Amino acid sequence: MSGTKDQLDDIFDTFLHRPKLFIDREVLRPDYVPDHLPHREEQIRQIAKILVPVLDKTRGSNIFIYGKTGTGKTAVVKYVLNRLIRRSHEIGALVEDCYVNCRIVGTAYRVLLRLGESIDVKIPFTGLATGEAFNRFEEALDHKGILLLVVLDEIDALVKIYGDNLIYELTRVNETLSRGKVSIICISNDLLFKDLLDPRVLSSLGEEEVVFIPYTAPELKDILLERAKISFHDGVLTDGALNLCSALAAAEHGDARRALDLLRVAGELTEREGQDKIKEEHVRQAQKKIEEDRVVLVLKTLPIHTKLVLCSIFLMSRSQVKNAITGDVYEVYSELCNQLGLETLTQRRISGLINELDITGILNARVVSLGRYGRTKKIRLAITNNIINDAFADDPWTNKVLDYSPKCLSKK
Ligand code: ADP
Ligand code: MG
């Protein structure tokens, strides 16, 4: 082989000589906070004006921020806080901030751990009752005389599971402490979230409200243009692709995250094809890929019996059974369970699971009358077989049955 180029050399050479599209792909990732946030000047000013008394060591009002995902809430709050904390430290004010994403952090106790960390007080990972942990935090805050700006991002995720106790305690800190102070900034994607809060908590949290409305297509275009300048080399992004990203994301409730995802994935697909310009077709492929990835993720997290129901319908469609009825699906499902040595669920339960899958749009179930034999459902997948394969091929149970030929099908 030596001296001659083989197919691997070709792959390596193509890679090394591919057109370079990206200057820096990291700036398209969702957690990157840009230095400039177009079309959020008003919200930035509002939040800064509410919080600015901290420069005078006085607590600003609590703020309640809401708006749909991708409207810039997290980016704006982080941006204002960074600048505010920097200025506080410059003038020697004892101000600190603590940013917590409640959905990621998970439990009320872990939120407390983060609060402790932000003012350098150790709270053990386990072993303390939440109330006791909170007292430690409170005492330290008072002792140090810190004014703490607490951001509780995606707070709806916490309150839906753990209730609003922790927030209630936090809102009361200012009444009980003499030196330490807390100012709370709550962010929620769920506009109906306020209904979950106790009126006392709501009145204290909602001292000020800031609303983030969805971006329009031209606004998204401005945002993308600024980001494209630092992520792609000149001339890589065509106007058509830029406009399409903005239009698709505007239709998707004005979501800047979706717009940036589309741009990043379109860039990656273009790069993989070895082309030097991102065009509309790449954006369309990106849209399809993002949507499919989202479905694959949902499928991977389903419980095993739900996965087996989907596998059954998948195997039936592969055997050209186009409109499966509930009873037949159950027959295939039972055979798969048998094959795997799992207990079957009852046909009623399976029928329930089919309804759930119908509601989430993973399959279509249509009720049909069988005359005097009652009613049943005609069921078919609403997603492609490829998606099923992607989602289930590395699951230790389902990978054993994806290639299985159900005996009950060959009898029919
Ligand atoms: P939310 O918290 O409302 O869901 P984010 O603040 O996380 O939305 O914004 C989603 C993505 O869009 C982030 O990557 C963010 O940097 C970007 N983004 C949002 N608004 C703007 C803006 N006005 N200018 C630049 N980038 C923005
Ligand atoms: Mg956010």
Image (cartoon, rainbow, N blue to C red):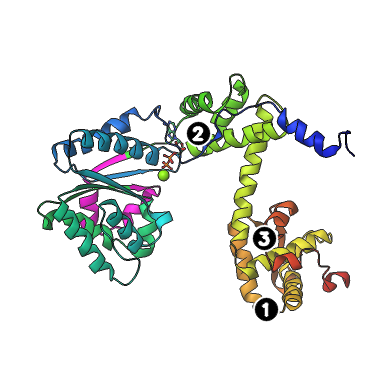
Q: Which mark is residue 344?
A: 1
Q: Look at the image and tell me in which quarter the C terminus lies.
A: bottom right
Q: Is the shortest distance between ligand 1 and the CB of mark 3 under 8 Å?
A: no
Tell which quarter ligand 1 is in. top left
User: What percent of the width, then of the height, locates residue 167?
Assistant: 26, 57
Sequence-wise, which precedes: disc 3 or disc 1? 1
Q: List x then y, in percent, for residue 72.
A: 41, 37
Q: Which mark is residue 27?
A: 2
Work out which quarter of the rendered image holds the N terminus and state it.
top right
Q: Is mark 2 within 8 Å of ligand 1?
A: no
Q: Could one spot residue 174 in this view of the protein?
A: yes
Q: CA distance from mark 1 to mark 2?
A: 49 Å
* Mark 1 residue's CB less than 8 Å from ligand 1: no
Residues at marks 3 and 2, CA–CA distance in whole angstroms: 43 Å
Residue 365 image label: 3
Q: Secondary structure at mark 3?
A: strand
Q: Quadrant of residue 18?
A: top right
- Residue range (magenta): 187-210
The local secondary structure at tag 2 comes to helix
**Quadrant of the rendered image containing residue 74:** top left
In the rendered structure, which amino acid carries the disc numbered 2? Answer: Val
Residue 196 belongs to magenta span: yes
Crowding at dot 3, Cα within 10 Å, few <14 / some 14-19 / many 20+, comes out as many
Query: Residue at 47% of width from left, 28% of height from top?
Result: 223
Nearer the observer: mark 3 or 1; the answer is: 1
* Label 3 to label 1: alpha-carbon separation: 21 Å
Query: What residue is shown at x 62% (from left), y 52% (from top)?
Result: 295
